[in-house]
Structure formats: C-alpha cells, structure tokens
Image (spheres, rainbow, N blue to C red):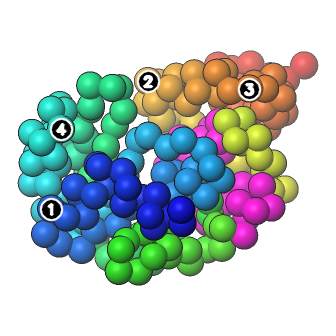
C-alpha cells in the first residue's frame, strides 16, 4: 500500500477530502510519520477557505469537541479517543506555507491532486534521519519550536543537524516567551520517549534548561 492509499484508507482523511468543498492539504508530522512507518494519530489540515466551518461539521460527524485556538488561528477538534484534528486556513500557496514551518521533515503536504509536496527536501532528510531547520527566522518567530527539535529527535531517534543545533543554542533564551503549558507538553513527550536521557543531556548542553528553569549544565 503506497502513502496515498494509506492516507485515503483512514476514514477521517477520507471524510475531510470528500467534504471540505475547497482546496485542502494534509500537512506536517502526520506525513512524516507515515513515511517512516510510525502510527500517526493527530492530523493537521490546511484549507484554502472555510476551515472553521469544516471543523464544526467534522466535530458533529465524529462526535468531537470543537475548540477555537484564537492565538494560533487554529480550529481544533478533540476526539473521544484523545486525538486532535486541526484545521487552518491557507493564507498563501501551499509551498509558501510549508516554507514557514519549523523543520524540513515537518514541511511536507499531501493532497489527492498533488501527491506529496516537499519543497525543502524533507524526505531526503528523513532518510538521513536528521532534523534540519527550514529557516532560523522560523525558530525565532515561534520559540517553542526550539524545544520541539529535541522532543522530535527523542521520539524518532533522530540526530540534530549541527547548523540547526547552533540556531537552537542561539534562540534558546527566547523560550521564556512561550506559554508554560506548551513547554510542559513538549517536555512530557520528550520524557516519555524511548531514550530521554540522551536528549535531556543535549538540552542541558544547549542552554534549554537554563532558559526554562534557570539551570545550567553541570
């Protein structure tokens, strides 16, 4: 079964692509996880228009809870199984949207009409098992993305590119601007990975804990 068949065999994906009534793409970590054979649950869609209306209809269809995240301009549906389905409006062409994401392995999209769209070489980096920032500006604009690199690396047992790691060190101090609950969520996921100690050490070496807790690496 190829990736297109896998995506459309999922009833949630099938419903969204059949009922969105606009241009729609499945984006981000879900694509990444499918490519490496990892079970993917949470889904993120970007739509040319009507993201809110689609999310509301989806919530009714799948008996979920509709949540409007105004700060992130995201319409989220919390399902009873604990998974989250996010809907966002596409403010530019899909390639432009992907170029504003955090890491190349997350900067991929898929639709039935286009197949996989990969403007930053995310598939190649995934094969190399390496986390590479799309742009340092993208990390500066959303400081939580700094911590997310270590969490993703821990969950997927990936290495962090040396240049990207220099960006993480540079912008580690900006983590103080992130909401505490979002930082807690990222740390919780890291701690529940297969080998958290390895990546906690990296966090300590790169100034992450100093930024969050005022702790320095010993």
Mark 1 to mark 3: distance in Å?
38 Å
Mark linked to residue 19: 1
Looking at the image, tell me whether mark 1 or mark 2 is earlier in sequence order: 1
- Tell me how far mark 3 sits from mark 4, CA to CA: 32 Å
Q: Earlier in the sequence, mark 1 or mark 3?
A: 1
Q: Can residue 187 be seen in this view?
A: no
Q: Name the residue under label 2.
A: 181
Task: Please provide percent x and percent y for residue 170.
Answer: 72, 49
Secondary structure mostly seen in the magenta stretch = helix
Q: Please tell me which residue is depicted at 66% across the width and 21% down the height of the picture.
A: 191
Instruction: Please tell me which residue is depicted at 76% across the width and 62% down the height of the picture.
Output: 127
Q: In this view, does 41 lie above or below 18?
A: above
Name the residue at 26% across, 25% down: 80
Q: Name the one closer to the observer, 187 or 46.
A: 46
Tag shown at residue 46: none
Residue nearest the viewer, comparing 193 with 186 = 193
Residue under circle 3? 194
The secondary structure type at the circle numbered 3 is: loop
Image height check: is 42 above or below 212? below
Q: Which of labels 1 and 2 is toward the front?
A: 1
Instruction: Answer whether labels 3 and 4 touch (C-beta < 8 Å).
Output: no
Mark 1 or 3: the one toward you: 1
Viewer-proximal residue among 5 and 195:
5
């Amino acid at each position: 079964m190829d990736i297109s068949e896998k995506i459309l065999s999922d009833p949630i994906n099938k419903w969204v692509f059949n009922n969105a009534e606009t241009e729609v793409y499945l984006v981000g970590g879900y694509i990444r996880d499918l490519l490496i054979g990892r079970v993917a649950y949470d889904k993120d869609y970007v739509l040319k228009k009507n993201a809110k209306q689609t999310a509301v209809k989806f919530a009714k269809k799948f008996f979920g809870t509709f949540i409007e995240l105004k700060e992130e301009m995201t319409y989220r549906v919390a399902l009873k199984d604990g998974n989250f389905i996010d809907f966002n409006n596409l403010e530019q062409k899909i390639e432009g949207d992907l170029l504003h994401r955090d890491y190349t392995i997350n900067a991929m999209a898929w639709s039935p009409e286009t197949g996989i769209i990969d403007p930053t070489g995310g598939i190649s980096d995934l094969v190399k098992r390496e986390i590479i920032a799309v742009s340092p500006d993208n990390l500066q604009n959303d400081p939580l993305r700094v911590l997310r690199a270590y969490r993703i690396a821990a969950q997927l047992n990936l290495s962090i590119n040396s240049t990207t790691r220099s960006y993480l060190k540079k912008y580690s101090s900006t983590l103080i601007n992130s909401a505490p609950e979002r930082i807690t969520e990222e740390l919780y996921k890291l701690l529940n990975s297969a080998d958290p100690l390895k990546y906690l050490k990296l966090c300590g070496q790169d100034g992450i804990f100093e930024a969050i807790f005022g702790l320095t690496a010993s």
